[in-house]
Amino acid sequence: MSKQVNLERRRQAIYGWLLLSPAALLLSLFAFYPSVATFWSSLFSKNTRRKPSEFIGSENYADLFADPTFWLVVKNNLFYAAITIPVSIAIALAMALWANSKIPVRGFVRTAYFTPTVLPMIAAANLWLFFYTPGLGVLDQIGALFGLPSVNWLGQPETALWAVIIVTIWKEAGFFMIFYLAALQTIPEDLKEAADIEGASRWTYLRRIVLPLLMPTTLFIMVNAMINSVKLIDHLFILTKGGPSDASKLILYYIWEMAFAFFDAPHAAAMTILVLAVLCIVAAIQFFYLDRRTHYQ
Amino acid sequence: MSGVSRHIEAAGAILLALIWISPLLFAFWAAFHSTSDAVNFNVTAPWTLDNFRTAWDGAPWMRYFLNTFLLVTVVLIGQFILTTLAGFAFAKLEFPGKNLVFILVLMQLFILPEVLIVENYAMVSRLGLFDTILGVGMPYMASAFGIFLMRQSFKSVPIELHEAARIEGCGLLGILWRVYVPLAKPTYLAYALVSVSTHWNNFLWPLIVTNSPETRPLTVGLSIFGAPENGVDISVISAATMMSVAPLLIAFLLFQRQFVQAFLRAGIK
């Protein structure tokens, strides 16, 4: 009997590892090894024809911290996160509340909110180009109706990052909406009835009952939005290319530029490690603060 | 609650919907009108297909469509195979080291492939896959998210079915193929929709790994076509944009419910 159990256990172990091995191999090749290799190469100097690569410890990091562009990019990205995260969450919530209430043409409203989610960021950027182009763009034409001067939204440091931010919010709010929508549909009707009987206003009901019940969803969306504020940079390639004078440059774009336009892999690696560190913190928030019961059953 | 505030809210909801959809509507309208009519908002202007003709002649779109189609297919097949096998191992088998490996897999959810571009590029070059469609797709095949999704789905399959198939003389892989995979169909569908739309839309990684029209997907082709230095006018860019989003957009409009459900399932991982 115990021999049989032993045999079964061994069989499961062999099968388990066999089934796992293709995925494990690819994960090692494209996630784990590259992470370690990135860290390793961030400790070496650039390999040039005159000077071969050599171990320099934390010098690449020191260079970054001394580089004003790096700090500008960090500041831009923090600003990008600080605006896109709360604004898209607030809009997503409003969208969900509306899309869940009894309004006419609800189907159209839901579709309109969600459609940007299925578009590529590059296409989204092209669509918005039509809005931002100075003189000819929709925004300028609307401005002209009110006698406002033409504005080069993408071409001036004060507005370029905002223009990028608006496209991101437009793209992700509808996506976040569906999570709120799903959560709203799990709130029992009796709560609304009870609130009505108590004479609670709609606002009180929203603030005291709906929002607390949506809290786990909000945290979940927040983590997603944080990751997006690192990840969503494709539109920069179309709209601003990080300019003018780096005013709209974000970290991932800067990593790309460093590695593939300036061919400076070590500094790009150092920056990647810093981004990974931030993502680890986000992961820790998700694991330790989020209510796991809600999303991990 | 008063009727007036209801109406105000409905108006707000519809206004927001119109604002939200307007970039797409403007581009759609511009794509079918001459540039001067488009930028002057000449509502009565005649409709034309000229922009599409100009755009179509300006780049090898047929090839780009084919590349994107091949890319999403290759990624999806790879993901289905790898995540099915790994998800099954995590859900139904007991073996030493399982929990540790599972935590490692979960970590990959946060090590975004987008962030590791430098070393992944080196890896793809080392494997001789630079400028190939397989090279674009490979880093995404062992998707931690897919493994997690499959594990959840397989876990919910009652053990009685597993036992019954075993008594019938089915081997482990046979049980996986005949019992688990058919029961997980909805999960596969949801995962397929999310995967296809993600990779149809992906840009940064394909931009780095492709270097020729023979491998370039639509997004990269579109970005090159629309680059300001090419001086293509706004109506033609709109036409090209409409063209490249059309397949996915039409699929979405037709199967909206499935798409939303899929994204929902995929998000709540």
Image: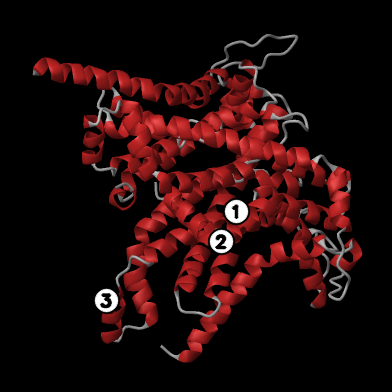
Mark 3 vs mark 2: tell me if same chain: yes
Compared to residue A23, the image places residue B145 above or below, namely: below
Q: Position of residue B118 (x, y in %)?
A: 61, 26
Q: Secondary structure at mark 1?
A: helix
- Mark 1 → mark 3, Cα distance in angstroms: 35 Å
The answer to whether mark 3 and mark 2 are in CB contact below 8 A is: no
Query: Residue tagged by mark 3?
Result: A190
Q: Quadrant of the N terminus of chain B?
A: bottom left
Q: Secondary structure at mark 2?
A: helix
Q: Quadrant of residue B108?
A: top left
Amino acid at the residue labelled 3 = Asp
Mark 1 vs mark 3: tell me if same chain: yes
Residue A42 is at least partly visible in this image: yes
B4 vs A195, left or right, is: right
Residue A248 is at least partly visible in this image: no
Q: Nearer the viewer, residue A209 or B251?
A: B251
A192 vs A252, left or right, is: left
Query: Residue tagged by mark 1?
Result: A118
Compared to residue A130, the image places residue A5 above or below, namely: above
Q: Position of residue A224 (x, y in %)?
A: 47, 49
